[in-house]
């Protein structure tokens, strides 16, 4: 969605996808230069950067958008699943950032966009692996921003709330890795799989993210953080104002 939005507004975009089938879909959607990129593979990251530099001579904006949500209560979560969550959401993001930074340092300019979440600000039950991965992104990015001060390179966090996408369906699919039948949370899992979970309020279309990314592309000095959706604003403010116990009471009702 974001790649198409930027392309329509005259940006030179190199969208990426994890599989050859998905790259072919991007080509069918009208992109001339889609590239394969699995962020868990350093060599593929390097190939994308080299390919774009060969064609354009520079890379002005890098959007770290890869990620998925592993569902499940913390007590049900095999350590292997937590490791896999971090491999994509955190370590893949870090390796992309680490590889693009020398390019931007040589240029003396650049913008890196890290896709965090409202769950990088607050935690919700049954999302421990995803919560932890987004909290890690927050820490890495806050540190990086300080280290890049005065370099001409800007790094921005997107704290996105509920946006209409395939994310939730993909997250529900990860429950097949959880031993549901022997869990004390069995009925919660069954309700989610049956579509009986609480409805998510304040949903916005995917253009909400694309518009912010475009704003960053055009900005001379982009902000370090962007809240997307009312849910993010409300919960972000609550995190600042409420005690931990009061915030927990609120989050258990979300």
Image: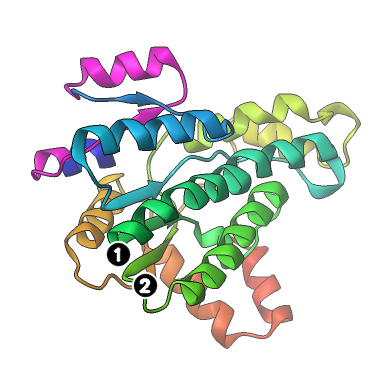
Which residue is the site of mark 2? 151
Mark 1: which secondary structure? loop
Q: Quadrant of the C terminus?
A: bottom right
Which residue is the site of mark 1? 108
74 horizontally vs 26: left or right: right
179 horizontally vs 82: left or right: right
Position of 29 relative to 60 (above/below): above
Q: Quadrant of the N terminus?
A: top left
Mark 2: which secondary structure? loop
The picture places residue 114, in percent across and down from the top left corner, at 44, 55
Position of 168 relative to 231 (above/below): above
Q: Could you classify mark 2 by the number of other residues whose Cα lies within 10 Å: few (under 14), some (14-19), or many (20 or more)?
A: few
- In front: 190, or 129? 129
Name which quarter of the figure residue 17 lies in.
top left
Position of 178 relative to 6 (above/below): above
Find the distance from the CA under tag 1 to the CA under tag 2: 7 Å
What colouring method underlies this structural image?
rainbow
The picture places residue 169, in percent across and down from the top left corner, at 52, 31
- In front: 101, or 67? 101
- Residue 202 in magenta? no
Name which quarter of the figure residue 36 lies in.
top left
Name which quarter of the figure residue 197 lies in.
top right
Q: At 48% from the left edge and 47% from the top edge, which residue is drawn?
A: 99
- Residue 21 in magenta? yes
The first of marks 1 and 2 along the sequence is 1
Disc 1 to disc 2: CB gap under 8 Å: yes
Residue 126 in view, yes or no:
no
The magenta region covers: 7-31
The picture places residue 171, in percent across and down from the top left corner, at 59, 35
Q: Could you classify mark 1 by the number of other residues whose Cα lies within 10 Å: few (under 14), some (14-19), or many (20 or more)?
A: few
- In front: 156, or 164? 156
């Amino acid at each position: 969605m974001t790649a198409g939005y930027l392309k329509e507004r005259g940006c030179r975009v190199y969208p990426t996808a994890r599989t050859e089938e998905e790259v072919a879909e991007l080509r069918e959607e009208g992109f001339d230069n889609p590239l394969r990129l699995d962020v868990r593979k350093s060599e593929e990251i390097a190939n994308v950067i080299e390919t774009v530099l060969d064609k354009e001579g520079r890379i002005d904006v890098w959007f770290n958008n890869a990620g998925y949500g592993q569902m499940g209560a913390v007590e049900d979560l095999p350590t292997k699943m937590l490791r896999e969550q971090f491999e994509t959401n955190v370590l893949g993001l870090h390796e992309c950032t680490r590889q693009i930074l020398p390019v931007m340092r040589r240029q003396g300019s650049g913008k890196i966009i890290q896709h965090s979440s409202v769950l990088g600000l607050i935690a919700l039950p049954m999302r421990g692996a995803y919560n932890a991965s987004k909290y890690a992104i927050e820490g890495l990015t806050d540190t990086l921003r300080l280290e890049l001060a005065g370099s001409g390179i800007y790094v921005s966090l997107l704290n996105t709330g509920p946006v209409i996408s395939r994310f939730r369906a993909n997250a529900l699919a990860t429950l097949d890795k959880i031993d549901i039948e022997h869990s004390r949370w069995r009925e919660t899992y069954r309700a989610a799989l049956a579509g009986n979970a609480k409805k998510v309020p304040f949903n916005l279309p995917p253009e909400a993210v694309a518009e912010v990314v475009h704003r960053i592309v055009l900005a001379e000095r982009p902000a370090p953080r962007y809240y997307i959706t009312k849910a993010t604003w409300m919960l972000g403010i609550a995190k600042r104002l409420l005690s931990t116990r009061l915030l927990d009471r609120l989050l258990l009702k979300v």
